[in-house]
Amino acid sequence: MLSIHIASSITKSLFSTINPYAATTLRHLFSGLFLLSFYPFWKIQINQKEWKRIFFYGFTLAGMTLFYYLSIEKIPIGISMAIEFIGPLSLSLIASKKLLDFLWSIFALIGILLLISHQEISLIHQHGEIQQWGIFYALLGGFFWSLYIICGQKAGKSLPPLLVTGSGMLIAGALTAPLAIWKTQTFPLRQLPVIFIVALFSGAIPFSLEMIALQRLSIRIFSMCMSLEPAVSAICAFLLLGETLNKLQTLGIGCVITALLGSSFSKNKNDCRYK
């Protein structure tokens, strides 16, 4: 999570020279090529059903990343991440089989709402339509985030994590490449080394680890783990950008962490990998 949010801040700083479409495409292509270069993928036989699962995993990965980048181009990263978390939180609520699980999810939602400060909300009102598009993109990103969790768990059911993640990354890059070519007029080649490093720390490494987690955790537990994302985002902003946390935001982080711990301890028979 730390690497993702640090890399996201760096990516946003590059939007003045490279648009979100190109950033999404290059992130996925670089990550996919990097991962598959370490894995003898030609030795693995993949049937049609497994390829279909990998394709949908790549499709949801493309949508999740693209709409996230489009969102943070227009609104602060903290707000975007908090709004997008509606996706995995909804999954957690749907997958809750016990009242206690449902209550922990609601507790996490309260924490997310507390993380959105009054100053940031007033900033959205001041900038009007531009910020409204940012919220819309964040909502779409959250929708694809929930689909990514479902499709990722299905795709990783019987295949090695590096193979699934690397192949999905290449598919995601291929899907967004036409948009990147259409939207990009000039491209600064000097930014390629930075984009490659960002791709490793925001794509290849964290998503490979997430695929391993998806193979071992239930949708509910994984979705609750993702509730740490807005909290980690706020902490990174505080440490790296000097953005101070007010009392409500600090309380929000506490609520999210408490909900995650409580949900983890209330494990039930449905908390197993996808079947």
Image: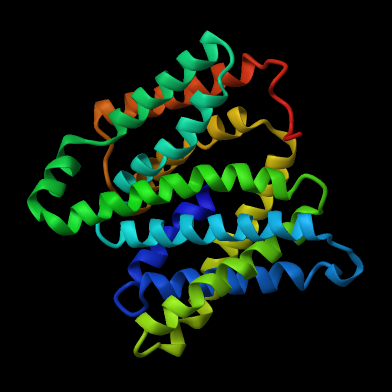
> To which quarter of the image does residue 37 belong?
bottom right
Q: Residue at x 52, y 9 (%)?
A: 99
Is 219 left, or right, of 136 in this rendering? right
Q: Residue at x 75, y 69 (%)?
A: 36
Residue 246, x across and y down, in percent: 24, 32
* Res. 7 visible in picture: no
Is 107 left, or right, of 32 in this rendering? left
> To which quarter of the image does residue 234 belong?
top left
Q: Residue reaching furthest left?
A: 126
Is 138 left, or right, of 156 in this rendering? left
Residue 250, x across and y down, in percent: 33, 28
> To which quarter of the image does residue 172 belong?
bottom right
Residue 63, x across and y down, in percent: 47, 58
Out of 188 and 170, give the one closest to the viewer.
Answer: 170
* Res. 63 visible in picture: yes
Q: Residue at x 84, y 68 (%)?
A: 41
Is 89 left, or right, of 112 in this rendering? right
